[in-house]
Structure formats: C-alpha cells, structure tokens
Image (cartoon, rainbow, N blue to C red):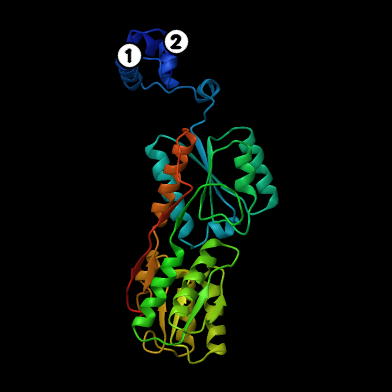
Amino acid sequence: MPRPTLEQVAQRAGVSRATVSRVVNDSPTVAESIRTAVRRAIDELGYVPNQAARSLVTQRTDSYALILPESPSRVFSDDQFFPGIIRGVSQELDSADKQLVLMVAGSQASHDRIERYALARHIDGVLIASMHGADPLPGTLARMGIPVLCGGRPLGQTGVPYVEVDNVNGGRMAVRHLLETGRTRIATIAGPQDMVAGIDRLTGYREELRGSDRRSIVAVGDFTRDSGAVAMRQLLEDDPDLDAVFVASDLMAHGALQALQAAGRRVPDDVAVIGFDDIALARYTEPPLSTVRQPIVGQGREMARQLLRLAAGESIADSVILPTELVIRGTT
C-alpha cells in the first residue's frame, strides 16, 4: 500500500498543501481550528512527515544526545546507574515525542567524533552524565551554541547547568545513623576522586565524623564490586577493630560484604555496613543492605526535562539538587 502524501492530507482536511506543511512544522501562524483539522487528517490517514525535509524547514531534528564519558564495558556492566539514567531520560523524551541518541565516549577519538556530530547539528541538545575530572566536553559543546546540561556537578568552571543528587547530605545521613547506633570506628570506601559523586560522598562522611570528633579511615574504590572487596580487605588490615563502614555505592558494598564474610566478620554484629544508591541488589544481599537512596531514574527525567526547556529558549536554574533518603535494612 502506498504511503499517504501531503496532498492527500490537505484534501482530507480541506486546506492547502502549504497549510499542512506549516502545521507539520509547528508554525504558530495557523489557527487552532485548522491545526486540529489537519492533525485529525494526519491521524486518519496515518501520514508520516518526511523528517529530513522537516528538519530543513524548522532547523530542528527532535533528537537529543545522552553522552556517557565511559568505556562500553563500564556502561554495559552491572552498575545500575547507567540503565537508570538512560531509562529516565528516554521516558521524558518519549513523552515529549523526541528521539534519544546514546553516545559512549571513553576516548579522545570518541570525544572528537561527538564534537563533529554536534557541530553538524544532528541533535538539538546534549546531556552528559558520569563525567571524570574537569572534562572539557560540556564547555566545548556549549561554546558551539548547543544546549548542554550535565548529570552531576561538573568539575571546573564550565558555566553549564546541571542536575545533581544531594551526595554530601547522603553521606552525612549514613554516618549519622552509624553513630546513633553506637558505632565508634567508622571507615569508608569512597568512590573515585575524579568524580563528583565520589568526592561529595566522602565529604559528607568526613563532615559528619568531624562533628563527632572521630578520625577518618578511608579506602578508595571505583564503584565496582571487585574494588569494594579489595578496599574492604585493605581496611581490615589497616584497622582490624573497625566496627562500621560507609560504602559509596551498593555494588562496592556487595563486594565489601563478601570480603567481610571471607574474613569471618559477622554483619552487623561485628561490622555494620551501609551503601549508597538503593539499587535492586540492595534488597537481596545477606543481610539486606542498608543504603542511601538516590533517585537515579528521577535524575534522568529531570535532566531531560531541563534540557528540553533550555532548547526551547526558556530560562532554567543553574542547578537542580534532588534529595537523598536513608533506607535502613539488616546490615546496620
């Protein structure tokens, strides 16, 4: 069956071909009653506009990129942060009838390729999440005149708006809970110190301990399960008498639980453990993991929501900070 044409839509709606084109391209010059008639005709005929032609007229592609500056093996691992962010962004873009373009940028070559793609205006805006260090990509894209928004506070002076979760307060809540339950030698397995989440969760841990006049006991992991196990073994060697550990991600906390079990330490009797993220795994560890819940999907949705407003020419806040929540289970 041949595809419906613009002329057939015009005939069905009782308007000119030019009027149909203006409606398809979202021109504000068409009366609402005529716009409704054209849209009804489009629906009845199943007409699909030519996207390439529409983009030429409107200078829009209705496509938005989500860039993850990580290796493919990291993005497609068992870390639930990445599918959570992708899910939230795609939900919000779908509801706005926009397309998601996913880009993994773990090398300089991939950064260069993304810059060329954006400069060619194949996308209407960019989201960047999981950044390491003072990544120049947000600032570079913003200077090209492309709407850019970051998931997480960018390190360095980029001037790019961002959506973040309250990592510092999450760390403080976790340590406060451990202190309130009588723990006295509280260690932490911090996340990577070239990432804002790792930096801020460690800051929250240190601030809360400082307020109780206790010393910090720190090991650093990379948000993976294996690094959590390695860091936990290091902490036990450095301070065999520690009685609690705040771990900056649930995946690392799972590795820490395995290391504690191998060392013959009972959880929570000998060592209390609290993680961060509240991924599905946290409910099924043994015992179930106490953690700090961050709204991963909600952060993705808010990122997309703010970027769509920015791309539409609206003013948005420099930053949006989403709350975290303490979830108490069996490990504390």
Viewport quadrant of the N terminus: top left
Of 27 and 330, nearer the camera is 27
Badge 2, how many Cα within 10 Å: few under 14, some, many 20+? few
* Residue 203 as seen in the image, left or right of residue 115: left
Residue drawn at 51 percent across, 55 percent down: 152
x and y, in percent, of residue 211 in the image: 44, 78
- How far is the residue under mark 2 from the one under mark 1? 12 Å
For numbered disc 2, what is the local secondary structure?
helix
Residue drawn at 66 percent across, 38 percent down: 116
x and y, in percent, of residue 49 in the image: 45, 22
> Is residue 5 among the parts visible in the rendering?
no
**Vertical order, 219 against 15 (above or below):** below
Viewport quadrant of the C terminus: bottom left
Badge 1, how many Cα within 10 Å: few under 14, some, many 20+? some
**Vertical order, 81 against 94 (above or below):** below
Does label 2 or label 1 sit earlier along the sequence?
Answer: 2
In the rendered structure, which amino acid carries the disc numbered 1? Ile
On the image, numbered disc 2 is attached to which residue?
18
> Is residue 145 among the parts visible in the rendering?
yes
* Residue 37 as seen in the image, left or right of residue 229: left
On the image, numbered disc 1 is attached to which residue?
34
